[in-house]
Image (cartoon, grey):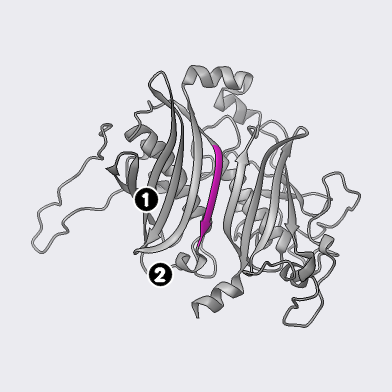
Amino acid sequence: MSTTGQLPKFPAPAAAGPSPRTLTTTVPKEYVHKTALSEVLLTSWQETAPDVHTVTAEWPRAHTFYSSRNRLHDPLLLIETIRQTIPLLSHLAYNVPFGHQLIWDHFTYSLEPHVLRTETAPTEIELRIVCSDIKRRKDTLSALTMDVEATRNGVLLGTAVARFTSHAPAIYRRLRGAYGDAREAMARAVPLPPPVAPQRVAREHFESVMLSPTDTRNRWQLRTDTTHPVIFDHPVDHAPGMLLLEAAHQAVHAALHPLEVIPVGLSTVFTRYAELDAPCWIEATVLGRPEAGREKMTKSGAEPGPKSAVGTQSRGGSETGADAGTNTGEGPEKGSGGSAGTLSQTDASGLIHTRVTAHQNGQELFSARVTARPLEEVSRTDS
């Protein structure tokens, strides 16, 4: 394996008929911090200018966790693809030694949902990444910002901005203290609580659900399954960023249920580590436009419910029992207003904005603003 700027290249084998000029393979799994080769999405990398890189990726037609829905790839596939470029570029382009900890600081993405359409073959993605605001500590990378443009067959799929920091093992151990041992941290993880019904969070299987119901509307306990083969591909000492982002997406689906949506944008700042030995609480608040409350109606003609009906209850609120039936997949929560209450809160572009926060031990871990589009609008655009 090369660490000087180019991935190893292998010649095509001799064959009786025409052979491809190059062979498609994944990058070594160690460069993307995965132990399962099947989870590696990146296929190549090259530096096209100083601090400018082109990375290619291939998405499977059906992923075991980031599953497609309504013939659309899961937006988390784009996020995971970008996440894999962080260690790849750190090690290959910026000489970060293996063993350093790479930690997200903030992350933003926006995508075009119709470009997520699945086809009969795996999806080829190209990322153009510009790195800036590069910080070093004693000639070793300590922080970096990536501006990402993702395309599919030359068509813009989305953009993203990711800022991360890099910590040497000794510094990370001092930073994490008693929480620094990954295996010990995972052994202390809180018992796994029961999941909400998968269909409420746009998942097919209980094993893929990251939220557990509580007695407060639009508030859930994070399900941190340390045996999950994708989220916990290897031992870690805190809840991974991908788990929190997946939980944020699922919270949006649950808050807007039964309206089917697809997340098309997110902006978040990670302020604290999500520890494994204490419950973590996820809350969602749908952000509405009061002036639109009586302008937009559902096809049934029903007037939207009150703005506070969808997820404005605070953590310590007195409303209880609103999540009754979440394990059985029953209808919309009492007082939620159903799809009428949520459609009334779309903006001029037909988007719904939701704020999702995570708290643990009384402290905020992250706050995200997630933008979603009703699936029926995406289907109408495609037709």
Q: Secondary structure at mark 2?
A: loop
x, y percent for residue 366: 66, 40
Asked if the stretch drawn in magenta spans residue 110, the answer is yes
Residue 252: which quarter of the image? bottom right
Q: Residue at x 55, y 44 (%)?
A: 107
Asked if the stretch drawn in magenta spans residue 236, the answer is no
Q: Which residue is mark 1?
A: 128
- Residue 313 lies, with reference to residue 165, above or below; the image says below
Q: Amino acid at mark 1?
A: Arg
x, y percent for residue 213: 76, 51
- Is residue 298 found left or right of 370 in the rendered image? right
Other-residue count near label 2 (Cα within 10 Å), few / some / many at <14 / 14–19 / ≥20: few
Disc number placed over residue 119 in the picture, else none: 2
Specify which label sits upstream in the sequence, 1 or 2.
2
Q: Residue at x 55, y 48 (%)?
A: 108
Query: What are the residue bounds of the magenta stretch?
Result: 105-111
Residue 260: which quarter of the image? bottom right
Q: Is residue 341 visible?
A: yes
- Is residue 27 found left or right of 295 in the rendered image? left
- Residue 259 lies, with reference to residue 229, above or below; the image says below
Closest to the camera, between mark 1 and mark 2, is 1
Q: Amino acid at mark 2?
A: Glu
